[in-house]
């Protein structure tokens, strides 16, 4: 099982090569307040002075520290290849293969790299520094040194430095594969430990938290940490381990870590003899190694699944980027054909990528025809904008100077054409909506169906321009046809239309029924023969065609004539005054006579009947015209139009120029896929060697 940690280190190396943090590998994050002794604990585990020192915030970027135990053979081989004599060395990810045998140089490089990203104003950055230390004196571990928790900004630090550090710490310790090493100084109250507090936020059960109590030698006289180390103050599931750090004076005097560990052991034997074998730096290293091994073993199954899923995703992503272009002519023709096919399939509803959030393509065109356009036509009132006075005026204008016995046909045609003309605007709007949807299909195909076009932005723009131009050319043709459909209806008012004739017959019967009802309501003093004579005259005047619905006007009863005379102005001709014959009477709202009321009612019914017939025709013929002149024409000619406009030898190089970042994204995806496949092989090796 000891070999599991090198395996994780190998996985870390794999993903470090592509600079990716997509896999949360098992590691140990060190958390604590400033000057709690975090860096000293890490240096004790490394066995060398490797971390920057100073007052205030020193760790300003996460340091991912991999400790690799090397055997003599590996040490000899590496020394021969790189010309180094020492048995310990370090390597940074950002300096590639450069080897650092001098640990002072390693410390200086950490400081330089920190300032390069974070600046020199004590600010922090979440971009990690990767350091790998090879030594025969270390156990295999992966540790993350994080900035110390602080409360008050000092110097040039940003005002929200506390929040920044907290978010950075939570980013690492929220990883369920991370063991939290909570560091607290023994000369502070454990109940107020910020490290344990933040650890409990993400690990309330304490399943992956180990507490380290530092500075045991700096406690007040007469006190000790016995209760704390026994877990009586703050119980921690994974345990509490006490250590003794080097003081600043020891560091200034160049006291080695090895000497410090010997002094630590002597202190524990003297001060805590019963707990000495379960505390100290060496015990901490062995404990961390054991915890990390078991943690890795528990995480590997999920890790394997995650790697396989990501490998499949990156394989698909790499496929979408396509291979570098070799045969330009073939590639261009394939892309044009694929786009044209996808465009047509989107209209037909057989596209590979179907929208689920909204209607698209042919489905939206169908909705425009039968819902939007259909409902708009149905909402058009057959008599909208037409008043009774308009109808009466049209009837009177059509009779000329002679009083009419019948309602003139001209008035009906004039008024019904005016109403039919109102159907043209929604019909043209239907064409516009379909044209807009055909334009939207271009973007749909670009986004979902033909991702290869994203590789070639100039080709994409050229295809959009060609299709847009084709749609633009078909728009006036389609509008003209729709305009003609309405003009055709206006050109000839077919009063012999079967549906219109049936409506006229039905209205004739209704009027005849109303006449009979009025006859029944006549006073008994009125002679039936006179009344019958009037009826006979009506019957003689209207048989065989739609004029039969019209009634002869009444001359008016004597009482009505008397009332009309009483309403005449005093300066009327009857009184001897002159009248200006140029004054034209303006129609005003008034009570219509029985005949006028009847004539207007008949005309309105005829207009409504004929309008409904025309509306039905328009509702049926406009979608057919749009499909033939716009939709189907574009579908049938799109392929040939694209080939004719774009498939030219002089345009190949320009159209098939990849976007600037496409090659880089393809290489990154290929590298990541290679890393994931290699990681999968590493995990497979674990299974084969029964380490899992």
Image: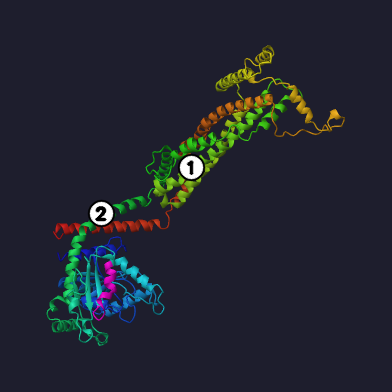
**Quadrant in the rendering for residue 300:** bottom left
Q: As rendered, which of 88 and 598 lies closer to the eye?
A: 598
Residue furthest toward the left? 274
Q: For the N terminus, which image quadrant?
A: bottom left
Residue 596 vertical position relative to residue 660 in the rendered view, above or below: above
Q: For the C terminus, which image quadrant?
A: bottom left
Local crowd at mark 1 within 10 Å, few (<14), some, or many (≥20)? Answer: some
Q: Position of residue 457 (x, y in %)?
A: 45, 52
Q: As rendered, which of 518 and 26 lies closer to the eye?
A: 518
**Quadrant in the rendering for residue 606:** top right
**Quadrant in the rendering for residue 567:** top right
Q: Is residue 624 magenta?
A: no
Which residue occupies 38% across, 44% down? 353
Q: In the picture provided, is 452 more to the left or to the right than 600?
A: left
Residue 223 vertical position relative to residue 358 in the rendered view, above or below: below
Residue placed under numbered mark 1 in the picture: 437
């Amino acid at each position: 099982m000891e070999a599991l940690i090198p395996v994780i280190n190998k996985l870390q190396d794999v993903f470090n090569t592509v600079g990716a943090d997509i896999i949360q590998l098992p590691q140990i994050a060190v958390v604590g307040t400033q000057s709690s002794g975090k860096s000293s604990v890490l240096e004790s585990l490394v066995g060398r002075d490797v971390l920057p020192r100073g007052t205030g915030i020193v760790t300003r970027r996460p340091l991912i520290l991999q400790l690799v135990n090397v055997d003599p053979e590996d040490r000899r081989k590496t020394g021969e290849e790189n010309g180094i004599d020492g048995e310990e060395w370090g390597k940074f990810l950002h300096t590639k293969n450069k080897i650092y045998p001098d640990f002072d140089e390693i410390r200086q490089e950490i400081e330089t790299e920190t300032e390069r990203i974070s600046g020199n104003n004590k600010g922090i950055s979440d971009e990690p520094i990767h350091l790998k230390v090879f030594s025969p004196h270390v156990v295999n571990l992966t540790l993350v040194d994080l900035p110390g928790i602080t409360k008050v900004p000092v110097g040039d630090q940003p005002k929200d430095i506390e929040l920044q550090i907290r978010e950075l710490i939570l980013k690492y310790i929220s990883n369920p594969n991370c063991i939290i090493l909570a560091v607290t100084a023994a000369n502070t109250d454990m109940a107020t430990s910020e490290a344990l507090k933040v650890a409990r936020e993400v690990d309330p059960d304490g399943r992956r938290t180990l507490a380290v109590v530092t500075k045991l030698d700096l406690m007040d006289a007469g006190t000790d940490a016995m209760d704390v180390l026994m877990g009586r103050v703050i119980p921690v599931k994974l345990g509490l381990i006490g250590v003794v750090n080097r003081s600043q004076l020891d560091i200034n005097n160049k006291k080695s870590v090895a000497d410090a560990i010997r002094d630590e052991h002597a202190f524990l034997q003297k001060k805590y003899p019963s707990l000495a074998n379960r505390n100290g730096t060496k015990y901490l290293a062995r404990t961390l190694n054991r915890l990390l091994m078991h943690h890795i073993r528990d995480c590997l199954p999920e890790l394997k699944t995650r790697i396989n899923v990501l490998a499949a995703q990156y394989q698909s992503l790499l496929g979408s980027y396509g291979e570098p272009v070799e045969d330009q002519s073939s590639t261009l023709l394939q892309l044009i054909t694929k786009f044209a096919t996808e465009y047509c399939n989107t209209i037909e509803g057989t596209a590979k990528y179907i929208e689920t959030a909204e209607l698209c393509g042919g489905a939206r065109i169908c909705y425009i025809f039968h819902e939007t356009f259909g409902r708009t036509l149905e909402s058009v009132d057959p008599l909208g904008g037409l008043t009774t006075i308009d109808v009466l005026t049209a009837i009177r204008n059509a009779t000329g100077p002679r009083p009419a016995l019948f309602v003139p046909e001209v008035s009906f045609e004039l008024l019904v054409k005016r109403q039919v003309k109102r159907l043209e605007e929604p019909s043209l709007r239907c064409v516009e909506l379909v044209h807009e949807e055909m334009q939207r299909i271009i973007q749909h195909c670009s986004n979902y169906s033909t991702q290869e076009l994203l590789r070639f932005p100039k080709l994409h723009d050229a295809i959009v321009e060609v299709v847009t131009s084709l749609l633009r050319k078909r728009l006036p043709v389609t509008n003209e046809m729709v305009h003609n459909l309405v003009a055709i209806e206006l050109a000839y008012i077919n009063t012999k239309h079967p549906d219109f004739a049936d409506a006229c017959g039905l209205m004739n019967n209704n009027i005849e029924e109303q006449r009979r009802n009025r006859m029944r309501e006549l006073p008994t003093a009125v002679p039936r023969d006179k009344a019958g004579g009037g009826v006979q005259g009506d019957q003689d005047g209207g048989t065989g065609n739609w004029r039969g619905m019209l009634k002869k006007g009444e001359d008016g009863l004597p009482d009505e004539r008397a009332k009309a005379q009483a309403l005449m102005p005093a300066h009327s001709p009857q009184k001897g005054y002159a009248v200006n014959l140029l004054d034209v009477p303006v129609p005003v709202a008034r009570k219509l006579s029985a005949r006028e009321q009847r004539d207007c009612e008949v005309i309105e019914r005829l207009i409504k009947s004929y309008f409904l017939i025309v509306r039905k025709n328009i509702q049926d013929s406009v979608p057919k015209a749009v499909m033939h002149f716009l939709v189907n024409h574009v579908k049938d000619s799109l392929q040939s139009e694209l080939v004719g406009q774009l498939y030219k030898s002089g345009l190949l190089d320009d159209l098939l120029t990849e976007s600037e970042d496409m090659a880089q994204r393809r290489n990154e995806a290929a590298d990541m896929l290679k890393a994931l496949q290699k990681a999968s092989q590493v995990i497979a090796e674990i299974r084969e060697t029964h380490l899992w």
